[in-house]
Image: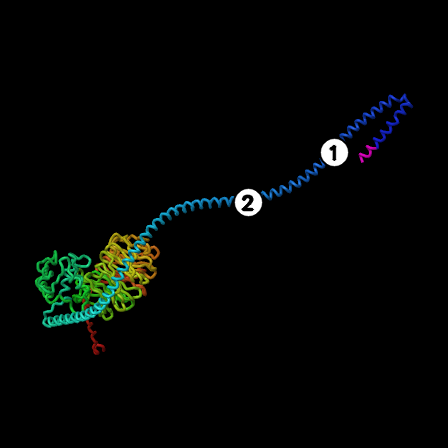
Amino acid sequence: MFPSILRNFLSTLFLIGLTLPSAVAQDKTNAAPIEAARQKAIGQYKQRQAIQGELNSFQEEVRNLKKSLATMTSMQADLKKQLAEVQKKLTEQETASTASSKKLSTATTAEKTAQTALEAAQKKLVAAKTASATAKKDADAKLAAVKASKESLAGIQKTTADLTTKSITAVQTLKQTAIKINEKDAVLKSSAKAENEHWKQVEKLHTEAGTWVSFAKEIAPMFQKRCLACHNEGKPRGQLKMDNYNVLLHGGESGALVDLEKPELSTLIAMIEDGSMPKDDDPLTQEQIATVTKWISMGARLDAGLNVTSPLIEIMPRPSYLTPPKEYPAPIPVNAIALHQDGIRVVTSGYHELLIWSTENGELTRRIPGVAERVYDLAFMGKSNLIAAATGTPGEVGEVKIFDINTGSMIKSLHVSAAIITGLDFSSDDTHLATCGADGAIHIFDTATWNKTLTIHDHGDWVNDIAWSPDGTKIASASRDKTSKVFDVKTGNNIMTFNGHNNVVTAITFLLKGEEIATGGDDRRLRIWKIADASEVRNVAGFGGAITSLKLLEDGKLLSAATDKKIRIHAAADHKIEKTLIGPTAELLSLDVVSSPLNVASGSLGGEVHMWSLDQDKPIRNWLAKPAPAPVVETPKPEATPDKKEDK
């Protein structure tokens, strides 16, 4: 709209200009004002033209700006698009860069690995070249050896052929020799049998004539008493062992003891005649020397039917013991005591006998003689009437015997030893009996056959006490060597050794679960040990004397007896002293307990027997285990019958 108005305005001004001359001519009087007006108009025109030019310039600039704006808008759109593309590309490039970095890292690692492998390969190459050179040398040597072997093989094949021929001959000869050996062996056995028969005949004739010297009855007891102390398996002086017939014939450093061809030249005869045996002891009597000399001259034979490897003590006649006195002049120590399961009978140790007492009144009901001087331990076989006795005469013999207390008869002389038997215990199922003694040995017997099933030599001194585990798989021992040990009864292997007492250990028992044992001894301490690691888990003091016996109750509590004359009840949880029972006037040596009903019996050094009830502090009954003659009971006189007349 603005441009069309401007055009009309300009056209009007042009027409006015064309008419101005005629107007001037017509009216010269108005020329000045008109000129002025015209000049103003021209000036205005010029001004307008200038403005128009400026306006046009502005419009052009506006158009250019619009174009530029459009261009810039387009460019901006393009830039946005490009920016999006660049950003997308940048993201892709960053992702690619990350991947490349990973690849670079992997490649770098691979490069390093490859470099390492290359270096290793180079080393291997060098080694391979060296090995190749070595292998070549070796191959050359092998080829040379093969050649030599082939040449040798040819020689061997020839030799083999020769040997084959000789082998066939040798086999034939061997068969013939084997036949001869069998024939000779048969002749030898026949000869040995005949020799044995001749010796039996010699033994028979000598026996009938009263001149036979029995090794078992005469020689073995002599050797056992006078020689074995210095010539045993443990300490064979001069390397001479005399534990059994077989080893003593082998002799020692001085050679064989016996010369059967020239008996008078036998080393044994020379040594007992000149007094060099026994060494550092009184010589044998002339009668004993004559007996040994005669035995050797008769062939130094072992009695027919005896085992050459049996210990001397086992083939010797069982010892005969003194008959116990009818009454004891004084009480003797009650070393052993055992309660029968019926609770009404108790057995105590006596002098060469077992004494059976009534627990109800302390009366002596039976005496069982036929044992060694002292009884060291007693144990009933379950609820039966069979009792095992560990006995011994110090310095002479130890013996285990089984008796029936109902009849007083001996059921079995189970074991004999040169050392006293100090302890014994039946397994919980009564299928086995374990014994121990002053020789440091432990023996286990099957109670069905009474055969010995195991012997253990592990202690360096007396074994004082022994106990079975609740499950019957282990036994524990207490020893004078200051240790207690646990053994596997199948193998005899030592499972664990406890060394904490530092003094003689006299008593031992397993606790309820069989995982711990309790021990006591001369150190006056009750110690609880863990079998798994041999650790001491509890140590209970408070004893005024040595602990002599330990017994486990069904509720897990322990009973202990000590030489301070007291019995102590120990709590099941920590085994601390829960209660102390007093009453004996002498040191306590033995203790036993039965559970149904609960009965406890103890024996003392002074010969006292005490019966206890654990709910009381003092004994319920006591007596001296001293056989005495039955008291004389006078027959009461009948009362006088009143006279009938007097009645009237």
> What is the magenta range?
1-7
Q: Who comes first in sequence, dot 2 or dot 1?
A: 1
**What secondary structure characterizes most of the magenta part?**
helix
- Residue 394: percent from the left, percent from the top? 18, 60
Which residue is identified by label 1?
Answer: 60
Numbered-mark total? 2
Residue type at numbered disc 2: Ala
To which quarter of the image does residue 363 belong? bottom left
Left or right, residue 442 beside residue 56:
left
Quick check: can you spot residue 565? no
Which quadrant does the C terminus fall into?
bottom left
Task: Indicate which disc residue 508 carries.
Answer: none
- Is residue 3 a member of the stretch shown in magenta? yes
Which residue is identified by label 2?
Answer: 96
- Residue 143: percent from the left, percent from the top? 32, 54
363 or 646: nearer the viewer: 363
Secondary structure under the numbered disc 2 in the rendered image? helix
- Is residue 340 a member of the stretch shown in magenta? no
- Residue 188: percent from the left, percent from the top? 17, 69
Is 358 drawn above or below residue 71 in the view shown? Answer: below
Secondary structure under the numbered disc 1 in the rendered image? helix
